[in-house]
Image: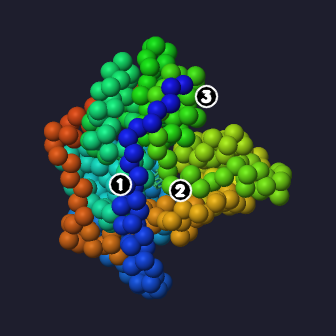
Amino acid sequence: MEKTSPPDNTENLAADLTVVREYLDRAQTPEHLSAKEEAQCRQQLIELMNRKNARLVAHYYTEAVIQELAEQSGGFVGDSLEMARFGHDCDADILIVAGVRFMGESAKILSPDKKVLMPTLEATCSLDIACPIETFAPYCDAHPDRTVVVYANTSAAVKARADWVVTSSIALDVVEHLMEKGEKILWAPDKHLGSYIHKTTGADMLLWDAACIVHEEFKSRGLQNMRALYPEAAILAHPESPEGVLELADVVGSTTQIIKAAQSVPNRQIIVATDNGIFHKLQQLAPDKEFIIAPTAGNDATCRSCAHCPWMAMNTLPTMLQALEEESSEILVEPQLARQAMTPLQRMLDFASEQQLMVKGKA
Ligand code: 13P
Ligand code: SF4
């Protein structure tokens, strides 16, 4: 596998992490709602969503109360592929995307006629930050012989430069398909997912060098120690985790695939290497099992609550209510760019349908 040293994006990343730290400092005290305030907020949101024909689409990493609200109000909770599909297929006038910016942008690209709101536009992703179009486009230009496959955790501009967009639930299948056609791949931005796919398929892949700051914190040494403590436990890991962690895992998959595996593996104890927001759905669907978060090093500057994405944590009921009331925090994608980005995104959705990787609803 050809490895690469793409341009240094650390300055960019540091600037955005500062925004996250500042936001978390501000958010620490005022955010807590009493049970009564929370119930009022939920009720107001439900009424407003009905009145405005709005639907809430939430990721598994968001707060439990947001996931519950999405399901209770006729919206959806899922992984990033399912969120994109639901947003595209539902007949709402307004989509509220509780997740991170790339999820809102994908929803807008796939549904240009819908208004897409987010509780905050500050919620981004370290993978998106570390793959700016200004450095990515010339890198692609330098490798014209390669099919450009980008992870969904990227900006609209990066998607527009790609031949394929994939999410973690479909990335392996797409790369296998391309490999069978004899294509060489330029993969961006997640190096861990890229190297996992390369190891699994043997595809010829050039890898961009970026990682998820949350999954990067899971360490194989700690996981080995934990396995010694829980020898009967199964290990389920998201493919954004480092190679050593994935090697120890019994199942590697997207958030939905982890949830499905948790229900089907015979083990009663399950060690989970992904964002701890997923525990809400895991406990709901497999109440008899014991879920244990994989150990993290916890050294990263944003790691206020390790194994939890600081950007996902920016989604709250009050900010969601405000966004819907004011129809603010709207995701806008420049139409020409959106049309270009639609092609590789739609290619993924069509491929998913053809492969019968159908999204049949909640995990
Ligand atoms: P999924 O596609 O598995 O939902 O993952 C999205 C993500 O950002 C994981 O960190
Ligand atoms: Fe991005 Fe990681 Fe957060 Fe997922 S968990 S949105 S990959 S920073």
Secondary structure of the residue carrying numbered label 1: helix
For residue 264, say whether it is visible: no
Q: Is 22 positioned to the left or the right of 200 in the image?
A: left
Task: Give the Cα separation between the discs numbered 3 and 2.
Answer: 23 Å
Q: Is 17 positioned to the left or the right of 343 in the image?
A: right
Q: Identify which residue, 337 or 256, lies in the foreground.
A: 337
The kind of residue on which mark 1 rests is Asn
**Dot placed on the residue nearer the N-terminal end, 3 or 1:** 1
**Dot placed on the residue nearer the N-terminal end, 1 or 2:** 1
Instruction: Reply above or below: 153 against 181.
Output: below
Q: From the Cβ of disc 2, is ligand 2 less than 8 Å away?
A: yes
Task: Give the Cα separation between the discs numbered 1 and 2.
Answer: 18 Å
Instruction: Reply above or below: 5 against 331.
Output: above
Task: Give the Cα separation between the discs numbered 3 and 1.
Answer: 32 Å
Q: Which residue is mark 2?
A: 214
The kind of residue on which mark 2 rests is Val
> What x and y, as percent, mark residue 201?
58, 24
Disc marking residue 86: none
Q: Is 264 positioned to the left or the right of 299 in the image?
A: right
Name which residue lies at 26% across and 69% down.
323
Task: Characterize the local packing of mark 1: few (<14), some (14-19) or many (20 or more) Cα atoms within 10 angstroms.
Answer: some
Task: Characterize the local packing of mark 3: few (<14), some (14-19) or many (20 or more) Cα atoms within 10 angstroms.
Answer: few
Name which residue lies at 46% across and 28% down.
206
> What x and y, as percent, mark residue 131?
37, 44
Name which residue lies at 70% across and 49% down.
220
Disc marking residue 200: 3
Secondary structure of the residue carrying numbered label 2: loop
Q: Which residue is mark 1?
A: 12
**Dot placed on the residue nearer the N-terminal end, 3 or 2:** 3
Give the position of the N terminus as an image quadrant.
Answer: top right
